[in-house]
Amino acid sequence: MARLGIILHGVTGRMGYNQHLVRSILAFRDQGGITLKSGEKLEIDPIIVGRNGAKMEELAKKHNIKRWSTDLDAALANSDDTIFFDAGTTLMRAELLSRALDAGKHVYCEKPISDDLQVAIDLARKARRSGLKHGVVQDKLFLPGLRKLALLRDSGFFGKILSVRGEFGYWVFEGDWGVPAQRPSWNYRKGDGGGIILDMLCHWRYVLDNLFGEVKAVSCLGATHIPRRIDEQGKPYDCDTDDAAYATFELEGGVIAQVNSSWAVRVRRDDLVTFQVDGTHGSAVAGLTKCWSQHRVNTPKPVWNPDQPQTIDFYKTWDEVPDTQAFDNGFKAQWEMFIRHVVEDAPWPYGLEAGAKGVQLAELGLKSWAERRWLDVPALEF
């Protein structure tokens, strides 16, 4: 059995722990590794690294992880470990990835790869020059619902795609009346890398680019709807960055996309995120796992009449796209792609260049809000 050593940094946070450590890396371990094209099994051997030794030791004992450390330099110096992964804070990420590249490690990370576009571009260029493999998480593309949208697109179901409408978000409790907040307080502090525009426009860049057309222009309005919240210590703090974003995008081919993102919205839709795609021949609405479609021959003909109750149950006029394959956890599926890219040189389209494009759109979204105008999205050079 072959072995692949992976350094995991930042896996005590909610996303790093649940999706990357438990549901991806440890899931590979528990299934006996990854079967390579040659038929050989690849053992995944992680080391978890963080500043808090007590947390690292507790995590290692809980999940029977053999290796843990508080010494990142020593971990990077170990030639037995091939990949460095980071899911820590955005403000530290570029420096950590740069150190890992200097140590000769392939790098994979969460997004955003930075809060500064020039830093992101420089990092992508450095990764390219190094000849090492590099990648950024693009998890939404691996959701079953969006994969079904891609299937409909590839089949020609939509005809010419006209528009895309996305709704993302949920109510994040303020923490001041008995229900604790379900997001950490740094999300609402600009100095800590918070803000929903920086967080979510990085996601929407790769979703739009890969599924519907490259983003060519953006108009974005941000808001801080709830200016004061309660932190993890039970103390009130001022929120100095955006908790909602209302963005419109022009895509290649004339497609118009509108995406609302908010941590101050109550959900009355099929899922925490939904995308509706309308085309000349058909439409579809996808959530995280499910997708519904309506072809033009099945489209009802409503008539506007405000003087009587609506007679059409519109939800019943859509058909669910069936599960025609088993979908693995999206983070795990992308992890396997990256591992195969490293070990077998398999195709990989999600390098740090894609991460820089996400930072670019977030920066332009913030600038559009500040200047109250449309902005073009120029091509980046690497």
Image: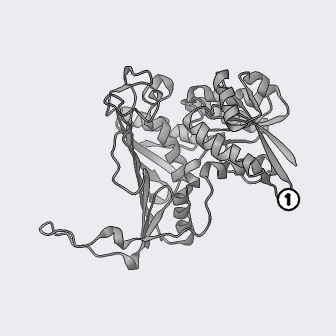
| Residue 144 locus on image (x, y percent) | 55, 59
| Residue 321 locus on image (x, y percent) | 50, 69
- Left or right of residue 82, residue 219 in this image: left
| Residue 192 locus on image (x, y percent) | 50, 24
Please, is residue 66 above or below residue 282 in the view?
A: above
Q: Residue 122: in sight, yes or no?
A: yes
Q: Could you say which is closer to the camera, residue 317 or residue 149?
A: 317
Q: Could you say which is closer to the camera, residue 133 or residue 73?
A: 73
Dot 1 alpha-carbon crowd within 10 angstroms: few under 14, some 14 to 19, many 20 or more: few
Res 98 → quadrant: top right
Q: Residue 374: in sight, yes or no?
A: no
Res 13 → quadrant: top right
Q: Could you say which is closer to the camera, residue 16 or residue 301?
A: 16
- Which quadrant of the figure contains the C terminus? top right
**What's the amino acid at mark 1?**
Gly
What is the basis of the colouring in this image? Answer: one colour
Q: Residue at x 66, y 28 (%)?
A: 58
- How many marks on residues? 1
For disc 1, the marked residue is: 39
- Left or right of residue 91, residue 198 in this image: left
Q: Of all residues shown, which one is farthest toward the bottom?
A: 297
Q: Could you say which is closer to the camera, residue 64 or residue 44?
A: 64
Element on which disc 1 rests: loop
Q: Residue at x 66, y 46 (%)?
A: 24
Please, is residue 253 above or below residue 171 in the view?
A: below
Please, is residue 15 above or below residue 272 in the view?
A: above
| Residue 232 locus on image (x, y percent) | 45, 24
